[in-house]
Every structure is written in structure tokens, then in C-alpha cells.
Image: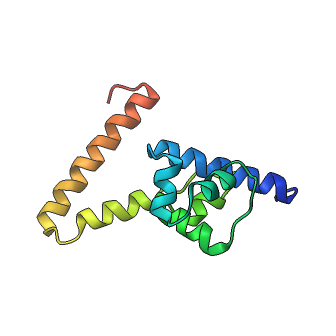
Amino acid sequence: MVSNDTSFYKEIGSRIRRIRTLKGMTQTELAEKAGLSFSVINGIENARSGMHLVTFANIAEALEVSPGDILLLKTPPSNSRHIEELLSLLEGRSPAELEALLKVGRKMFEFTDSQRTGSDD
């Protein structure tokens, strides 16, 4: 639960800034992509101003994340974008291709799991 409006806007602004910088975007680039001004993005990231729901939606879309990834204050961002991308890569593949990908994926996870646990299977 959010304790007050100020801490909520600070956390949202911080999360937007973190996502933006991870994506290598400047505030100006985010503003242009979201159809907003630099001063609006700067004010939001620094918790000097709130935002309307449509502004929030435009920022999330410009960052190519779900609104939930920004709002889930104490939860790490979801993998939904990765899952959607994987599904789009699999569309139109033949059953043989899908089976081959499953085999590769299983082997890869077996290897990474064994590295994590330190076993030599």
C-alpha cells in the first residue's frame, strides 16, 4: 500500500526513469515518443507533478512496457513482454521446428540449472 501521494509519485517517477535509462533513452526521446514535452517527463520523473491516466498510458507505450510494470511498486517487472516476443517468434513455425526449439530450450535450461546448482550432469 502506498503511504501518501508524494511517495507514490516519487516511486512512479523513479521507476519510469529507471526503465527509460535501461532502454538507453533520454528524457527528450521519451517525451517525443510519448507525444509529451520534455518538461512534463522531467516533472514526472522528479515527482514535481502528477499525471493523467492517458499520459501514464502514453509513457508506458513509449517505453514499450505494460502499465503494470511501472505500477507494481514492490514487485519486479513481469516477463510478459518477453513471453509475447517469444510467442511472436514461434508463430508460423512448423511442428518440426517447434520440436527442435523445445529440445534446444530444454538442454539450455538443464545446462544453466546445473551451473547454478554446481552439479556436473
Q: Quadrant of residue 116?
A: top left
Q: Position of residue 111 (x, y in %)?
A: 32, 35
In the rendered structure, the answer to whether residue 33 lies left or right of residue 77 reads: left
Q: How is the image coloured?
A: rainbow
Q: Quadrant of residue 59?
A: bottom right
The reply to whether residue 64 is in sight is no
Q: Quadrant of residue 40?
A: bottom right
**Furthest-bottom residue in this view:** 54
* Residue at 19% over, 62% down: 98
* Residue at 24% over, 55% down: 102
Q: Position of residue 86 (x, y in %)?
A: 32, 60
Considering depth in this image, is 23 or 111 the residue closer to the camera? 23
59 is higher (above) or lower (below) than 113: below
111 is higher (above) or lower (below) than 85: above
Considering depth in this image, is 106 or 86 the residue closer to the camera? 86
Considering depth in this image, is 63 or 120 the residue closer to the camera? 63
The reply to whether residue 72 is in sight is yes
- Give the tally of numbered discs: 0
* Residue at 28% over, 49% down: 105
* Residue at 49% over, 55% down: 30
Q: Position of residue 96 (x, y in %)?
A: 12, 63
In the rendered structure, the answer to whether residue 16 lies left or right of residue 10 reads: left
Quadrant location, the N terminus: bottom right
**Furthest-right residue in this view:** 3
Considering depth in this image, is 107 or 60 the residue closer to the camera? 60
Quadrant location, the C terminus: top left
